[in-house]
Image: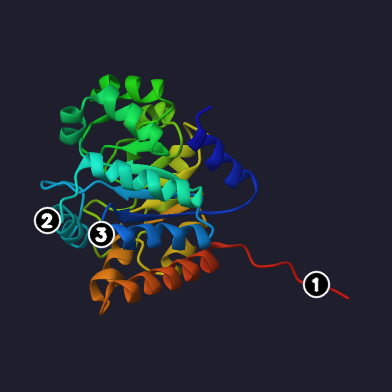
Amino acid sequence: MMQLERTTRAERDAGRKALVPFFTAGYPSEDAFLDLVRAAADAGCRTVEVGIPFSDPVADGPLIQASSLAALRAGMTLRRALALTARATAATGVGAVVMSYVNPVLRFGVAEFAAAARDAGVVGVILPDVPHEEAAPLRGPLAAAGLPLIELVAPTTGRDRAARIAADARGFLYLVALAGVTGAAADPAAHAAELVDRARAATDLPCYVGFGVSDPEGARRVVRDADGVIVGSALVRLLLAAPHQMAGVQDVAAFLQSLRAAISPPAPEVTS
């Protein structure tokens, strides 16, 4: 069993809902990125998602696109992003799931990327522009480095295809809560129960819901059914709105603490 799956199953077996924040590598700066990962660790996150900035994304909404563009303008590359991720994972002990598009990975070399990612403390890879049916040439080299290719299931995924995807999934199954890009205005809990039920008919892998989760109440509603929640655009929004980088990091840290409180089970009552 790969490291990521050991972590996700251990969290679920302990009755703990997972909180996975998304941070763009190098945004708003490399030092601030490291501070954000530390804030995630302080909020009890075992895993973070690291977005590799890319100029032509298909799944990212305008907020994450803005953060990627800023990081690219500052000189961020896939190789630099992995080096930065290595610093973050070494400093905090959290595992990183990187979200990239396939072109940079192909240019890097799939096997070379897999080895470099593993050495950087990466525990899983998301490639949203690679269909499940075309992923085998990538899945093999990643698995050889101990990295699962995270599979995605959306509300538009047919039941039979969702079952095939779920059966091949490792690490966790990423359930996309809406038909759209990240940060779109929708209720992420509206499809969560159906998506989780459909997935659990095919796999006992932990199921995490992302896309559109923007506040503690939405996260709380999502994890009534899911094993974890992934939050990205809401964090970038705080960083963009902050008067300076340190204020943004502090705002994100407080928000992560509020999310953790919302998805954590209430403390048992003490009786005398």
Q: Residues within 10 Å of mark 1 (few under 14, many from 20)?
A: few
Residue type, numbered disc 1: Val
**Residue position for label 1:** 270
Discs 1/3, front:
3
Q: Position of residue 243 (x, y in %)?
A: 25, 80
Q: Which mark is residue 185?
A: none
> Three-letter amino acid code at disc 2?
Arg
Residue type for callout 3: Tyr
| Residue 95 x/y as whole percent | 46, 44
Q: From the image, state whether disc 2 or disc 1 is nearer to you.
A: 2
Instruction: Tell me the number on the disc at residue 73.
Output: 2
In primary-sequence order, the first of circles 2 and 1 is 2
Question: Label 1, label 3: how many angstroms apart (C-alpha)?
Answer: 44 Å
Q: CA distance from mark 2 to mark 1?
A: 54 Å
Q: Position of residue 150 (x, y in %)?
A: 37, 36
SS for dot 3 = loop
63 or 219: which is nearer to us?
Answer: 63
Give the mark nearest the N terminus, 1 or 3. 3
In whole angstroms, how far apart are the C-alphas of marks 2 and 3?
A: 11 Å
